[in-house]
Amino acid sequence: MSQPPRRWTILTVVACLVAVGWLLVVAIGAEEPLARDDFEHDLSQWLTVGPEGNVRIVPEDGTEADNHVLELVPLQGGFVHTLLRGSEGWTNVRIDGRVLFPTNGDGYLGLIYNHRRRGSRTDFGCIYVKGNGSYIRVSPHRDGNPSWRLYEELKVPLEGPRTIVPNRWYRFRLDVVGREARFAFGDLAQPLVLFDGIEMDRGAIGLEARPGRGDPVWVDDIVVRRFGAITAAGPDTRAKPVSPTLLTQWEAFGPFARPNNAVESGGEAPVPRSVVADERGMVITGRFTDFLGGDRHLAYLRTTLEGGEDGARRDLVFSTANRIDAWLDGRHLGTVEPQDYVWTDFLSTPEHVAARFPVTLSPGPNNLLLRVDGSRFAGGGFLAAVTPTTDP
């Protein structure tokens, strides 16, 4: 058999080397982080929300290598966070970094993900670590308002050897795929939180200081990479099936800046929109009431309760983070005052009930109307159910 010309053999080898080199470049490029910052230079990669002096680079005390860190300082009566520039459309990312709480006061680091701005509203997912108290909480922000009161059952204490100690660095990792987020702290191989309770599936990522008063927090060595699917590793803190007695299908009116007489009197009202509770059965009113973006903090929700042939005695039961006024067929039942937390076990734990109204349902449909005030900090949701009456 004749041999190929030597020049073609050389060209083939060169072409193969070029192809292999290109594949290596592509492979290496695929591993390149989307963003990286050790805070040894400036904050040009970040966009600060709040006073610029509350997000700053400072030297780490006592380090021989003159290491610098990002310091987030809470704003009394306000909000401070910083977002990675250019991350507005990101999804499926892994965020690694280190955090240190330099004091034993109210230190807090919030990991922001899927940050979206729509008109005057800003909504985003947030999982945060608290230094003093030593715990992790989920706290999606709806129109800027934290909502940790709605997720108390998802709080993860950091106890024993995991207890947070001031002036000690801890590694953290947040994986975000679509609407799901998985958070690990300290031991990155053992995620502590898996949460899927926000509405946005992509958006900017960033860091948040404790809303309002509090102590500074330090962050260093941020790296953001593309990430694939979230597995079931770690505790599943996602929503669980709900009780069939919960009221989960509603029509919503508003939001409004002041009470609306037409809605309350059953007159000619604006066209409602359908609202469905989340998988826990909770109605997240912060999705449509204003907090930071405007003064329309009131909303109405309406549903129908079916009565029996001769009427029926029932209890209308609430657990809520916001003030609620309730009417049944135009009759004001009363006002429900807010609780520190909304409790998903309120139907089985009497001390977690905010209010209970005994009602008599007329034959056929009965109209239940609620007015919810969404102006409370860290509020924005309630649970409601109709149960057999507890009256003798």
Image (cartoon, rainbow, N blue to C red):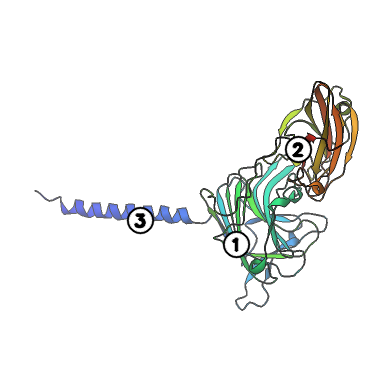
- Disc number at residue 288? 2
User: What is the CA distance from the residue labelled 1 to the residue labelled 3?
Assistant: 32 Å
Q: Nearer the viewer, residue 267 or 335?
A: 335
Asked which secondary structure carries label 1, the reply is strand
Where is residue 157, by image quadrant? bottom right
Q: Nearer the viewer, residue 189 or 45?
A: 189
Asked which secondary structure carries label 2, the reply is loop
The residue pinned by badge 3 equals: 21
How dense is the environment of label 1, judged by Cα within 10 Å: few (below 14), some, or many (20 and up)? some
Amino acid type assigned to the residue bearing label 1 in the image: Gly
Indicate which disc, 1 or 2, sits on the residue closer to the N terminus: 1
Residue 356, position as x, y percentages in the image: 85, 39
- Disc number at residue 323? none
Residue 389, position as x, y percentages in the image: 82, 35
The answer to whether 355 appears left or right of 278 in the picture is: right
User: What is the CA distance from the residue labelled 1 to the residue labelled 2?
Assistant: 33 Å
Indicate which disc, 1 or 3, sits on the residue closer to the N terminus: 3
The quadrant of the image that shows the C terminus is: top right
Asked which secondary structure carries label 3, the reply is helix
Residue at image position (57%, 55%) is 234
Indicate which disc, 3 or 2, sits on the residue closer to the N terminus: 3
Amino acid type assigned to the residue bearing label 2 in the image: Phe
Q: Is residue 306 visible?
A: yes
User: What is the CA distance from the residue labelled 3 to the residue labelled 2?
Assistant: 53 Å
Residue at image position (59%, 45%) is 89
The residue pinned by badge 1 equals: 97
The answer to whether 148 appears left or right of 170 in the picture is: right
